[in-house]
Amino acid sequence: MSSLPQIKAASSLDQILGTLAAAGRAASVDVAGDMDGSWESIMLYLDAYVDAHPTASASEATTHSKLDKDVEANLTKVGRACTHEGKNHCGGNAEEAFAAGRVDALFGYSERLHDAARKGTDPSKVTIVPATLGQANRLLLFTDALVLSPQCSSAECKDAAVKFATFYTDARVYETVMLSRDGDQGAKPRYLLPATQAAFERPDVQADPIYNQLQGYVGGADAYPNEGVPAVKQSGVLRGLVAKALGIKRDD
């Protein structure tokens, strides 16, 4: 997410970083965001792996005990772009700094823009591109799911569960949540990615400058692996290796 529309033309990591370095403000960080969270770091690695190896399966990366060399090199480039005046900005929230103009590009989930908008960012002036972490871009997405509990075995319980799921996944309900209509007057949109195309097609959602951009990316995305990710997250090995490649220093 950037205030520099030029990033729209970039199609590789080198091009994105080159654009930020050339067009960004000298007194600002090229890119910042939380790349060190227990989920974020694993998602970052899997995304970077398929961007560096477009024909590979993302599930392969969940078995790695050390970083792929190409991915490590690319993450090191990102880490350098995150570093400004000796401080690395890859390991924490940067929404406030982005809103204040101290960061040229904000890395992270789309909902990070909700906090940035609350802090003063004008969404109509933000350009969003998928994080291309290699020489190609294979967009990966994962979604939450509603699962029927084995304890819900009676006909009454199952009927109630179906009714709730039908309500919850209705495009009108998605629209309410996406645009924060359940919040205070003037609340900023949450900028969550909906799990249904119908939600994007609601007129007020389509009129929003951010959701309008996000819709163009979702249709061609691949799914994150259904297996392997929880175990990798729990072990913490890849998280530590990713942090080292990015140049993040932490006490744990």
Image: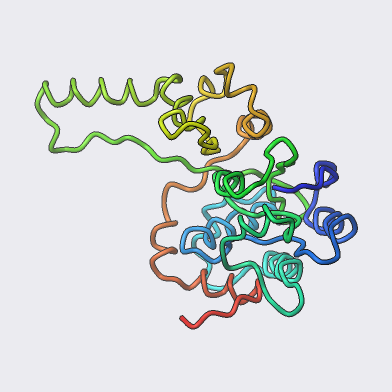
Q: How many marks?
A: 0
Task: Give 228 or 33, whichever is nearer the viewer.
Answer: 33
Among the 4 quarters of the image, the one containing residue 155 = top left
Which residue appears at 74% of the width and 48% of the height?
A: 2
Task: Give left or right: position of 138 versus 36.
Answer: right
Q: Position of residue 38 (x, y in %)?
A: 46, 63
Q: Residue at x 72, y 43 (%)?
A: 129
Q: Is 213 displayed left or right of 27 in the figure?
A: left
Check the image and report above or below for 202 versus 65.
above
Please tell me which residue is depicted at 17% across the width and 25% down the height of the picture. 158
Provide residue 35's location: percent of width, then percent of height.
58, 62
- Please tell me which residue is depicted at 61% across the width and 29% down the height of the picture: 219
Identify the image's colour scheme: rainbow, by chain, secondary structure or one colour: rainbow
Residue 49 falls in image quadrant: bottom right
Residue 161 in picture, x, y percent from top left: 22, 26
Which picture quadrant has residue 96? bottom right
As drawn, the residue found furthest toward the front would be 185
- Residue occupying the far bottom of the picture: 251
Q: What percent of the width, then of the height, locates residue 29? A: 75, 64
Can you say whether 84 is above or below 188 in the image?
A: below
201 and 177: which is toward the camera = 177
For residue 251, side relative to residue 104 (left or right) = left
Q: Among all residues in the image, which is located at the extreme right?
A: 22
Observer-nearest of 28 and 227: 28
